[in-house]
Image: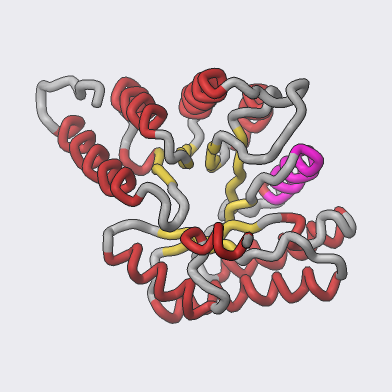
Amino acid sequence: MVQKLSQRYIAGPELKDAREAVRHVNAERKLATIDVLGEEITTEEEAAAIVRAYQDVFADIQRCGLDSNVSVKLTGLGLKLGYDLCRENLRTVVDDAASRGNFVRIDMEDSSTTDATLRLYRELREGGRANVGIVLQAYLRRTFDDVHALADLRPNVRLCKGIYIEPAAIAYRDFEEVRAQFLRAVDALVEAGSFVALATHDEWVVDRACELVARRGLEPDAYEFQMLLGVRERLGDAIEHLELVLVAAEAAPGDDPAPL
C-alpha cells in the first residue's frame, strides 16, 4: 500500500531509474535532488550500504553529466545507532561529494532528531565543509530561533512546512499559522543572507514568496523553488515562468520590479 501511494514520488528501485528521471527533469531546464531511501536501518552494515549507494549516485551524476545534487536522511546513516557513527558516515558522503564538485543537503526528520541534525551540520561547516546544506521545518515553534542560531554560517537552507505528526507544544497545527510561519522564516533567512530553497506545493505560499523575492530584489542565484517528483508539475512549470518574469523585471532599466 505504501509503495502504491508513494509511487509518483519515487523514480524507481534502481540507480538507473533515478538517472532517467533526472535526465527528464534536466531536459525541462530544472535541476534535481536525489534521495536514497532507507531510514529504517538497524545495523552499522546497513548504514554503510547507504553510504556506498550515495557514492554510486555521485559517480553516476558525474559520469553522465547530470545537473543534480543529493539529500540524506541521518537515520539512514546510523543516527539512531550512534552520533559518532552517523558523523563519520556523513563526513564520508560530504567529502565524496566535494571531491566531485557536488552538494549534500541534510534532510530534517521528526523532532527527536532536530538537535543532533543541527549539531552535525554546524560541525561540518565549522570543519571547513562548505558543500553542505540543511533543512528547516516552518511548523516547528523553534524554527525562527534556529534561523537566528544558524545565521553566522549563512547557511544554504531548504525550508518546508513539515510533515511529521508533532505535539502542539512544539509545532503549529493551524494551516494558516503554518503558512504565516513559513513566510516569516523565509524573510528571516533572506535577512540573514542565506540561500533559500523554498520547498512547497502551496500555490498561495509560492505567490507570497515571489512577492517577497521581488520586494527584496533578490538575485536569481539567491533562492530556488523545490517540489517533489510528480507533484503539481504544472505549478512547477508556472514557477519557472514566474522566475523568468522576475528576472526580466529586475533587468528592466528604470523600472522597479512589481510584485508577482
Rendered image quadrant of residue 235 = top left
Q: State left or right for residue 26 relative to residue 189.
A: left
The span picked out in magenta is: 111-124
Q: Quadrant of the C terminus?
A: top left
Front-most of residues 229 and 220:
229
What is the basis of the colouring in this image? secondary structure
Hey, which residue is sitting farthest front in the picture?
A: 1
Rendered image quadrant of residue 85 = bottom right
Q: State left or right for residue 48 relative to residue 243.
A: right
> Do we see residue 243 in this rendering?
yes
- Name the residue at 47% across, 52% down: 228
- Name the residue at 26% across, 43% down: 238
Report the number of discs: 0
Front-most of residues 250 and 66:
66
Front-most of residues 1 and 135:
1
- Name the residue at 20% across, 31% down: 250
Q: Is residue 119 magenta?
A: yes
Q: State left or right for residue 99 relative to residue 221.
A: right
Please tell me whether the stretch drawn in magenta is mainly helix, strand or loop: helix
Q: Is residue 136 above or below residue 257?
A: below
Q: Position of residue 63 (x, y in %)?
A: 44, 81
Q: Position of residue 122 (x, y in %)?
A: 71, 43
Q: Position of residue 24 (x, y in %)?
A: 33, 68
Q: Quadrant of the N terminus?
A: bottom right
Q: Is residue 254 above or below residue 66?
A: above
- Name the residue at 36% across, 71% down: 23
Q: Is residue 57 above or below residue 122?
A: below
> Do we see residue 191 in this rendering?
no
Q: Is residue 19 magenta?
A: no
Q: Is residue 195 above or below residue 228?
A: above
Hey, which residue is sitting farthest left in the picture?
A: 253
